[in-house]
Image (cartoon, coloured by chain):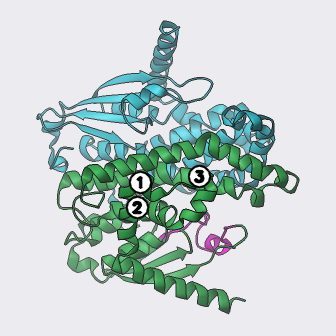
Chain colours: A cyan, B green
Amino acid sequence: MSSEDNKRSKDKTSKDKFYLYWLNDSRAHRILWTLEILKLDYEVEIHLRDPETFRCDTMFDIHQLGKAPMLKIIFADGSEPLFLLESGLIMQYLLKHYDPENILNPEKEADKLRVDYYLHYSEGTLQHLQISILINSVAKKIAPIGLKYLAKVFGKGLNNGYYIHEWRLNLEYLEKKLKEEGTGYFIGDKLTAADIILSFPVMENVFDNEYQIHKLIYDDRSLTKQYPNLAQWSLMIKNNALYSKITQVMNALVEEKKRSSQ
Amino acid sequence: MSSEDNKRSKDKTSKDKFYLYWLNDSRAHRILWTLEILKLDYEVEIHLRDPETFRCDTMFDIHQLGKAPMLKIIFADGSEPLFLLESGLIMQYLLKHYDPENILNPEKEADKLRVDYYLHYSEGTLQHLQISILINSVAKKIAPIGLKYLAKVFGKGLNNGYYIHEWRLNLEYLEKKLKEEGTGYFIGDKLTAADIILSFPVMENVFDNEYQIHKLIYDDRSLTKQYPNLAQWSLMIKNNALYSKITQVMNALVEEKKRSSQ
């Protein structure tokens, strides 16, 4: 890792290059969106999940943990390249070093701390519940052969017994936060990294996936009626011009890669 | 939250007061250890888990999510108190504002970034796997009545089918990291916040709990033989003077509180 990296000036950093290891249906999309918003000079390497297991073996060629996203930064000043893991850290780093004009950073110090909170909260608290609900729901696929019959029944039990309750608690919490803020955004009156980090666990995984969620939580009631502020926020995210653009581009590239690998 | 809080000088901050909401067998112990190392002026409010369900209803009186740790900071300069959640964020905040002499902070900028990485990694990647293994193992307790019989069998299947593999991958990763560093610590040649954040998921939950882990992962092989560097690091953490002291004090206070509430 390069030393003295927090002393880079805008002039020094404006020619740095970024290399994003991106996985479909993963947390990586948010980093791509951030790179795009900050107008950074980036390339994307596409990795694809196995549609049966959700795993992606090729990510292990890049790093021992095989998790997306991973971001490599090639510094224009020739200092040693930086390899960053963990979505919250990657976003903290990009905001600190590559947003001198506060495009994504909020203006107030207190609001910067609130952004940092959501960067930790999304990955430390919320995402865990969502992954567990999903894994329990696909348990039949990953359970050993002899247990496949029990898996489906039990996945439901485990989700109902613990995870769905915890997950709902968090949706209620986020709904309240948005209502209190009253601007349509999580922090202040513009898009910040708080909205970006929450785009995956709240918009993509829940509100843009309502039919699947109804099946996962065994509850057909409208999410929009239960969480009106979160629903409206999700629509705002989905319709964001840059977000729509990168999503369309990546969908097309994923389809192309799938076809060429058949 | 107070504004301009990153401009506080040592002089201004040395009289700030800290109020830690601490829960037994939780991530909160690490914040207590940090407060103690930085010689800050703190008080602890003890909350206890229900031994049957692991839940703690009284934490919900403090905050809607009911999660430990929570830290309140009362500023000596009279600015609005700060209420912090998420272990990684709390530690980042304490290191940034209350460690001017670099007791816990590493000296080099590049190492500060590596500390930040572990603060995100521990809560974003590692802890999730551990919680899931634990919850699946106690699934019988939390599953609905009709499913209790299946729960035990299935918890094993889910753990074997996904979580234990992922968890071992992470232990191997951390073992390699320690070996590469070669100092006995995760970053450089002294205790940093990286060691503190990992103390709960690695030392307390695994190496100091080996008998239970053997039962959870259905494998009796010695963890020390498989992960010698992690085992030695865990022993170093356990025998750390301040860590031992706070653990003894809190154990005594927990016993006292349990007795008085009977």
Most foreground residue, B153 or B227: B227
Chain ID at mark 3:
B
Q: Give the range drawn in magenta.
A: B54-70
Residue occupying the point 57% across, 59% down: B213
Give a yes or no on whether discs 3 and 1 share a subunit. yes
Q: How far apart are marks 2 and 1 (CA)?
A: 6 Å
For label 1, the residue is: B227
Please, is residue A34 above or below residue A254 in the view?
below
Residue occupying the point 53% across, 38% down: A200
Tell which circle, 2 or 3, labels the residue nearer the N-terminal end: 3
Residue occupying the point 29% across, 64% down: B192
Position in image of residue A134 (x %, y %): 65, 39
Position in image of residue A183 (x %, y %): 51, 48
Tell which circle, 3 or 1, labels the residue nearer the N-terminal end: 3
Q: What element carries label 1?
A: loop
Judged left or right of residue B183, residue A222 is right
For label 3, the residue is: B219
Q: Main secondary structure of the magenta part?
A: loop
Chain ID at mark 2:
B
Kind of residue at disc 1? Tyr
Judged left or right of residue B181, residue B170 is right
Kind of residue at disc 3? Asp
Position in image of residue A166 (x %, y %): 66, 55
- Label 2 Cα crowd, 10 Å radius (few <14 / some 14-19 / many 20+): many
Most foreground residue, A215 or A159: A159
Give a yes or no on whether discs 2 and 1 share a subunit. yes
Q: Does the rendering let one see residue A239?
A: yes
Kind of residue at disc 2? Ala
Tell me whether circle 2 and circle 1 mark residues in contact (CB < 8 Å): yes
Judged left or right of residue A255, residue A53 is right
